[in-house]
Image: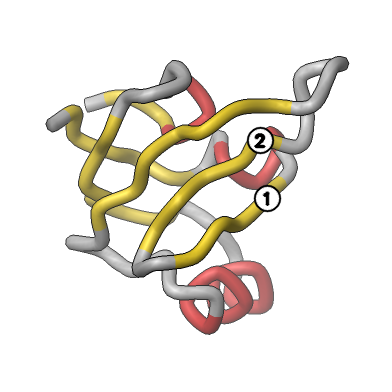
Amino acid sequence: MIRMCDLKPGQKGRILFLETDSPLRERLFIMGLTPGCVVEMVGKAPFGSPLIFRLRGYSLTLRKKDLEKIGVALL
């Protein structure tokens, strides 16, 4: 298990859990980041944040700070 922010470009992972407070957790759920969802790291901004992910047929960018709270299993 690693944190979602530690995925490298091209790596895929399955979300295991979200360790976050209610408002952020709800926002992430609405964006499709739910346990069991498969995500692929696509790339990152020049200074390392935000990071770009592909999931459920669309691309999503999130701050590294928020991704540190999401545990994934490598696929």
Q: Are marks 1 and 2 in contact (CB under 8 Å)?
A: yes
Tag 2 or tag 1, which sits nearer the N-term? Answer: 2
Which numbered circle lies on residue 51? 2
Instruction: Tell me the residue at 22%/26% (across/down).
Output: 1
Instruction: Tell me the residue at 21%/47% (across/down).
Output: 14
Amino acid type of the residue tagged 2 in the rendering: Leu
Q: Closest to the observer: 21 or 33?
A: 33
Q: Closest to the observer: 65 or 10?
A: 10
Instruction: Tell me the residue at 28%/39% (across/down).
Output: 72
Secondary structure beneath dot 2 equals strand
What x and y, as percent, mark residue 34? 34, 69
Query: Which residue in the protein does label 1 denote?
Result: 61
Instruction: Tell me the residue at 56%/35% (across/down).
Output: 68
What x and y, as percent, mark residue 28? 55, 69
What x and y, as percent, mark residue 13? 25, 38
Amino acid type of the residue tagged 1 in the rendering: Thr
Q: Residue furthest left?
A: 75
Q: Quadrant of residue 3?
A: top left
- How packed mark 2 is, by other alpha carbons closer than 10 Å (few <14, some 14-19, many 20 or more), is many
Secondary structure beneath dot 1 equals strand
Q: CA distance from mark 1 to mark 2?
A: 5 Å
- How packed mark 1 is, by other alpha carbons closer than 10 Å (few <14, some 14-19, many 20 or more), is some
The way the protein has been coloured in the rendering is secondary structure
